[in-house]
Amino acid sequence: MNTTDLPERGWVTRHGHVDLTGRPALFLDRDGTVIDNVPYLDDPARVSLLTGARETIAAFRSAGYAVIIVTNQSGVARGFVSPERYRAVEAAVLAALGPGLVDATYVCPFHPVHPWRKPEPGMLLAAAHDLGLRLADSTMVGDTLADVMAGARAGVAHVTHVLTGHGVPERAEVAAWVNVREDMNLPRLSFADSLGNLYLRDLG
Ligand SMILES: [Mg+2]
C-alpha cells in the first residue's frame, strides 16, 4: 500500500508508557459508555463518570487488558467542539477515572464518513497496529449499533452492548443487526445494563 492510500489519522493520545505488545484490549466507547452522554460535550465541568465504570476498567486492567477509548467526535468537524475544548474534556475524563487506568485515547474528529469513524473499525485497527494489541482476544463495549459494528468489523472476540447513553433505543437495532448477520463470523455478543455491570467472567 502506498502511503498516499492511507486515511488521514484522527487524534491519538498515549497515556503512560507501558509496553502493550501482545495484550488483548478493552476498547471503550466514551460518551454514553464511560461517561454520561452529553451531545457535543465541550465542557469539562459536565464530565460525569457512569456508575461502576472505574471499577470495571480497573478489573480488566488487573487481568492484563490494555484499555483504549475509541470515540467519534463529529462535533469537531461540525464546528461545535474546538480541538482545545475536546482536549480539556479528554483530560477531565482521565482525571475522573484516576491515574493509570487508560492506556490510550483514539479520536475520530471527522464527519460524516471516514475509515476511523465508527461503525468503521479504523480506530481499533490503528490502535492494534500502533500498540501491538491482540485483536482476536479483545473486547469492545459501547451503547450504539455503530460501536457493535466497529468491534465486529475489527475482528474482536467479544462485543458488549450497554443500555446507558443511547443504549435503550439502540438495543433493538443491535438485536436486529445480529439476526441479519447471523451467517457472519460475528464476535460473541453480550448485553449489559452498563459498563459497571460487565464482568470478565461474562466474556468466557
Ligand atoms: Mg456512545
Image: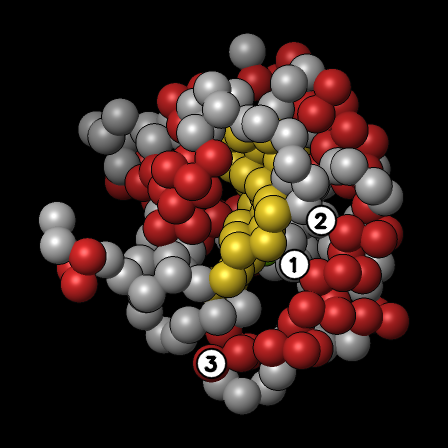
Query: Decide: marks 1, 2 in contact (CB < 8 A)?
Result: yes
- Tell me: residue 203, above or below residue 72: above
Circle 2: element type: loop
- Colour mapping: secondary structure
Q: Give the image location of residue 12, x and y in percent.
A: 53, 55
Q: Say which mark, if any, is on residue 77.
A: 3
Give the residue pinned by disc 1: 31
Pointer 2 residue Cβ closer than 8 Å to ligand 1 = no
Nearer to me, 105 or 41: 105
The first of marks 1 and 3 along the sequence is 1
Badge 1 amino acid: Asp
Q: Give the image location of residue 93, x and y in percent.
A: 77, 56
State whether residue 57 appears in this view. yes
The first of marks 2 and 3 along the sequence is 2
Q: Say which mark, if any, is on residue 34.
A: 2
Residue displayed at 37% across by 37% down: 129
Q: In which quarter of the image is residue 91?
A: bottom right
Q: Quadrant of residue 36?
A: bottom right
- Tell me: residue 126, above or below residue 74: above
Residue displayed at 78% across by 29% down: 58
Q: Quadrant of residue 37?
A: bottom right
